Amino acid sequence: MWVKLAFKLFSRELRRGELTIIFAAIALAVLTVFSLSAITERISLNLAQKSSDFIASDRRLSSNHAFEPQLLTQANKFGLATAEMLYFDSMLFANDELVLSSVKAITGSYPLRGKITIKDHLTSPAYDVDTGPKAGSIWLSEGLFYTLNVNVGDKIELGAGLFNVTKVLVKEPDAPFFSLSGNKRVLLNYADIPTTQAVQPGSRVFHRLLFAGNEQQLSEYYAWLKPQLKSNQTWQGIKDRQSPLGNNIVRAERFLLLAGLFGIMLAAVAMAVSAKRYCERQYDPVAMMKTLGGSRKVIRNIFLLHLSLVTVFSIVAGLMVGFVLQTIGADYLASFMGTELPQAGFRPWLLSAFIGLVCALMFSLKPLLDLFDIPPLRVLRRNLGDTLAISRIHIALSMMTIFVLMWIFSGEIMTTLILFASTLLIIAILFAISRLLFAAGRRLGLRPGSSWSLALATLQKRANANAIQLISFALAIKLMLFLVILKNDIITDWQMQVPADAPNMFIINIAEEQVTPIKQFFRDNNIAHEDFYPVFSGRVDAVNGEKFARRVSKQEGEEKDKNAKKGVSREPNLTWLASLPEGNVITEGQWFTYGVTGGNDIEVSVFDGWQDVLGLELGDTITLLVNEQVINAKVTSFRKVDWGTLKPNFVMILSPNMAGKVPVTYFSAAKLHDSDTKAISQLLQRYPTISMIDIKSQIEQAQAIIAQVSLAIGFVLSIVLVSGALVLVSQVQASLAERMEEMVILRTLGAKGRLIKLATLYEFMLLGGIAGLVAAIVSDIALLVIQQQLFDVAGRLHPYIWLLGPLSGALFVSSIGYFMVAHTMRQNTQGLLRKLG
Amino acid sequence: MSVLSQLNVIQVSGLTKRVNTLEGSLTILSDINFSVKSGESVAIVGASGSGKSTLLSLLAGLDVASQGEIHLDGEALSTLDEEARARLRADKIGFVFQSFMLVQSLTALENVMLPAELAGDHDAKAQAVELLDKVGLSHRFAHYPSQLSGGEQQRVAIARAFIGSPKILFADEPSANLDRKNGQLIENLLFDLNKQNGTTLVLVTHDEQLAKKCQRIIHIEGGQLEKISEGGAANVG
């Protein structure tokens, strides 16, 4: 019998809109989590896919020793696709010209991710292919054609082998992002290595194994591989790669993750508010049913069935709307990017349904238990049970649930803790503010009958309810401000790394006497270029006279040991400079003072990452071996270096009095346009010894990813904005009954409609303004921590949001709030009385 | 239990109700003793704050006494837990409240059916239709409380009170929220149905005129039973 009654009550409550808010809240939670997790997963998959292009695989294993064959056979057993690569430098010979080139020998499956771009002839258009040269053939980069004076179809000698030049190599996916290895690149079939006889025991060669497959296969293989990894073998994914792109991808994932968390927090607030409101609205019917003899069990069954029904309906609706939203969003992103986003797996479906279920249960549990406890005596003593309305257990339970959900969703305790702590801070501050403000309002002694005094009186009267509203508003505003600022900061930061006018071609190996004519050449051809830096190689031989061997070897990529990654094992490229390069910050000591003191001592400024690795202190003397020449340099400063920029960065910068002491080549960068192609060919023909590294494609790829992430953030932000608005709506709706009562009283007492309207508007403006101000302050502080801790960027305060917060808060809350109660204000007193029952 | 007490459908002895406040324990009702016979109509009268509504809540088992005992139809309320008291109310008690207390999401007919449905009565609808007809609302079955006037809502509440043929009907200021004409109508309806069904009526009111329509009047003053007098209907019963 109770089932029939339960369904009847359910359908009526649904029709009366009593369940709409709770329904919308769960659906909102589900659709937010679904669309966010589906979109972030799809974008992540796409980003990972794109990123994989940059290492031509999903993971790679590097070493300067040959790999055991079982590493490959085992990878194949795990279902992974594999390719082998070998790098070495070798001489190319043709037409009596001899040139040192960087050779990359590859197996037929290379590249596992991405494409190789080639040209049939120097002047024909470039196109993509999936595989490298066949055995017996060789592909050369454009510069080599000029240096060796060869054409496609000619034969050249590489080591002991003779090869057919069949294509012009334009780009490989894993070409170095920035290196001084030059553009004398050669692509060779792996099977031809023996023919060249270039690889002999003791030769300086670099081996690489490439792997591609799904995450599970990769992690299973890595689990097998890890115990047997040798110290000279490095396992790398795109995220480990020291490049602006790798860093940006990590940041992008973190950002999207953060946005996901915000969605959950907002949904949770909406859910907690609406569950509480729904249960409060049921106090009277439950008291009545108990009075009429309804047993606790029957009442419990009725409302648990309601909860189950609303949960199931809202999860299904949330999934459906979420699916549509994410499809539209993904399609839009895909069409914008001219690419297809891979489909998300089951995770978003399961995750969002699970979160909907957990929300429904955890946020309704305490209000429902309170509801079951409503004494029947409430039918006579009307306010009995109202004290249950603000339950510490409900708040604690809700908070705990939010924390656990955030943790589950993010899998990152640090992010969760920072966000959670800042939220608690908001709550504490707002409670204090609401108390102070409402107490101060009493003393203000505003003119009775004015809208402001009525607004303040209303705020004071509902101090507790207002504190909760303030917290909800502040939370919603905080999350939105968070996203806006992060979006601005991250994107600006990224765009600064890849500015539109960034040089897209590095020119290296410029001899001293070529500097002036090349500068002239650039001037004649209207090509913008950067300064010409002197560059030379040197090995760190001793510190304070104490020699040391290679003290640091490369670590496993995933350990993110940036010092080790920079590697002191290799010979760093050195320069001398008069002024501190852009993006470098002195952390200790002073920039060169030779100019002031006029001394002859050579000074060196060292990247701070090397400070601990080499055990350096200010005043130490570093002995550098440059072409067997010993250079002693005194450490006078340590620098923080942003390796994320596409600008040339140096581990060690020597003082300008180094000039003339060692032979150097020069280095510059230029911004080239498509129309400059002919000029560049001329330049290469005129100065065949110089090398050019085209980073245009890398910049374009980086910019495409930035655009993609910006769009994703915009999408996420709009979802969070809608969620925030819905939270506000649910919150205002929760106070509608009380507002109606007040309005009846005020109207009955003869208050003018205008007075009530203005009072309502001012009340919401005050609430929104205060919430916005607190949200802005707390967001800014929390962001400072987040940016430094998570995004590894210099945190800064954003004074503009201190104004934006309260203004947007006042505008947002007052417009939504006023709109919500406007309907109520239009009704006549009799109508309102009826509605109040 | 004596034969006399068995005839008394309500037996109150030494009833005391105390509540704890910030200033200490406050006695709302003190040592109340009286009985009500089956089919009798009794009014409980007193000024605001005299404790008459508290007495009603204790009699109906909505609240528990601090001391003393109430027997309802032979059952000692102090021995029953909340669930058992709910069952007792379902079986034997009907209610009419000052503020009607209708469930807003249910129609007039469904509101009347509610107690019977909660008790698992399959004949709820037929009974409800008949009762709504008796209170003159056969044309208002499908109306929600917000679509009914105050007088109509109270008539629905009266119909609801009589469903399941309760032995005792408790009414708390049933006409206080209504105008004189509607109040009169409701009072008449209440007494007529009470007579027809042979129900025991316990009415809480501060309206002397209404109280006089009952057979006996229990006067409560400052939480104590001041006196029990005969009402205007004493000879009728």
Image (cartoon, coloured by chain):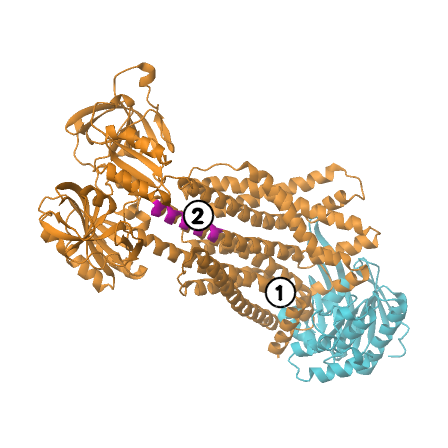
Chain colours: A orange, B cyan
Q: Residue at x 89, y 79 (%)?
A: B236
Q: Look at mark 2 in the image and give the residue it sits on.
A: A415
Residue B132 is at least partly visible in this image:
yes
Q: Quick one: SS at disc 1?
A: helix
Front position in the image: A22 or A752: A752
Q: Quadrant of residue B29?
A: bottom right
Side of A438 where A616 appears, left or right: left
For the C terminus of chain B, which image quadrant?
bottom right
Residue B73 is at least partly visible in this image:
no
Q: Amino acid at mark 1?
A: Thr
Where residue A392 appears, as percent x and y from the top left, is 57, 53
Q: Residue at x 55, y 69 (%)?
A: A313
Q: Quadrant of residue A388?
A: bottom right
* Residue A711 painted magenta: yes
Q: Look at mark 1 in the image and give the residue it sits on.
A: A20
Where residue B126 appears, as percent x and y from the top left, is 72, 85
Side of A763 where B214 appears, left or right: right
The answer to whether dots 1 and 2 both sit on one chain is yes
Where residue A811 appears, as percent x and y from the top left, is 65, 47
Question: Which chain is mark 2 on?
Answer: A
Where does the magenta region start and end? A696-713
